[in-house]
Image (cartoon, rainbow, N blue to C red):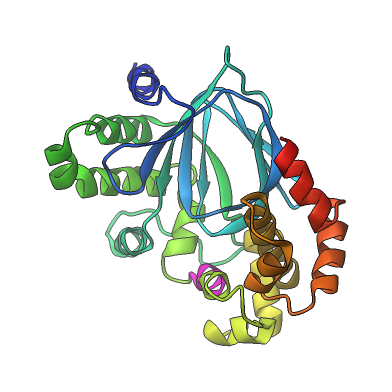
Amino acid sequence: MSKQLIKQLVERKAHQEGMTETGVKGVELFRVTNPVRCAPAVYEPSVVAILSGAKEAILDGKRYVYDSDLYMCCSMSMPVEAGTPTASPDNPLLGVIISLDTKVMTELSIEMESAVGAIHKPQKGALPPSFALAQWDEEFTKALLRLLQLEGNMTDSAILGDGRLRELYYAVLKGAAGESARRAFGVGNEIARSIDYLSSRLDEVVTIEDMAAQVGMSRAVLHRKFKEATTLSPIQFVKSMRLNTAAMKIAGGMNVSVAAMEVGYASSSQFSREFKRMYGQSPKQWSQSKKLT
């Protein structure tokens, strides 16, 4: 019943194509009525809950589809290909995206790890992927409903918004995506911190040694843990983040040479070669194809 109420709220408020603000910082509704093929994107730490239709994401060659049965939790910045290939006016994609506040998620994760009776992270074993799909459970559904019920009331949103967001974060940390999120935001979050370090320096030369030094790891240990967490090696991740970010800038109308420089490429020819190798099109062809769609 709660999920149906959430859907009604989203349908009523997100009546226009694209994103709709809710009045709570970091929480937006969306409606998509046209199919969009998967294209390079960067998922920032967030939770996406679908109420109608489906989204598709491709990570390291693997295809993931999530709909009203599964919410998505991305606990680290990730280079992906994303799209809405089944959206249509008769079957619109409707949903909610909630940005994950690093400070609050870290506080909650550490509190959970130290609290008596809390679910503790495993001491050994592989890190779970930073991209998780989770079944809606009762706590997540109720927390999301309470959060969205603030929409439209500026006073309630200002006074209660942070508390309701914290409640939703806690539901995520306790749910099926919780282990992944706790690893990213709790004690031992070295991989998430190394990704933050890289993401803020895409226009600089950042080596794997730099990333390892930032989190006090050897290159070999960083490589192993990084691949366990993201499915990509650090080198693959750096290249994907830079090229995906550049592709998004070019699609938004930025000059190819400027986009290349903004993600750390000093050589336009090298950028073009690597871009074509990854996407099957030159940057110029990519730019033209985006203008036609």
Vertically, is 154 above or below 178?
above
Q: Quadrant of residue 237?
A: bottom right
Q: Is residue 94 left or right of residue 39?
A: left
The structure residue drawn at horizontal position 63% and vertical position 57%, both measured from the top left corner, is 249
Q: Which is nearer the eye, 41 or 233?
A: 41
Q: Is any part of residue 61 visible from this angle? A: no
The answer to whether 149 appears left or right of 79 in the picture is left
What main secondary structure does the magenta stretch of the protein show? helix
191 magenta-colored: yes
Q: Which residue is located at x 78 percent, y 50 percent?
A: 286
Q: Which residues are magenta?
A: 189-195
Residue 165, image x, y percentages:
28, 46
Q: Is 47 drawn above or below residue 256 in the view shown?
A: above
- Seen as rendered, the residue at the extreme top is 90
Q: Residue at x 17, y 33 (%)?
A: 153
Quadrant where the N terminus lies?
top left
> Who is closer to the viewer here, 130 or 50?
50
Residue 139 place in picture, x, y as percent: 33, 34
Viewer-side residue, 230 vs 289: 289
Q: Which x, y percent locates residue 199?
A: 56, 69
Image side of residue 249 versus residue 4, left or right: right
Q: Residue at (79%, 77%) from the top-left corner?
A: 267
Q: Is residue 23 visible?
A: yes
Task: Please indicate whether residue 138 sits to the left or right of residue 64 in the image.
Answer: left
Instruction: For the C terminus, give its image quadrant.
Output: top right
Counting labels gives 0
The vertical placement of 145 against 41, above or below, is: above
Name the quadrant containing residue 150.
top left
Q: Nearer the viewer, residue 221 or 94?
A: 94
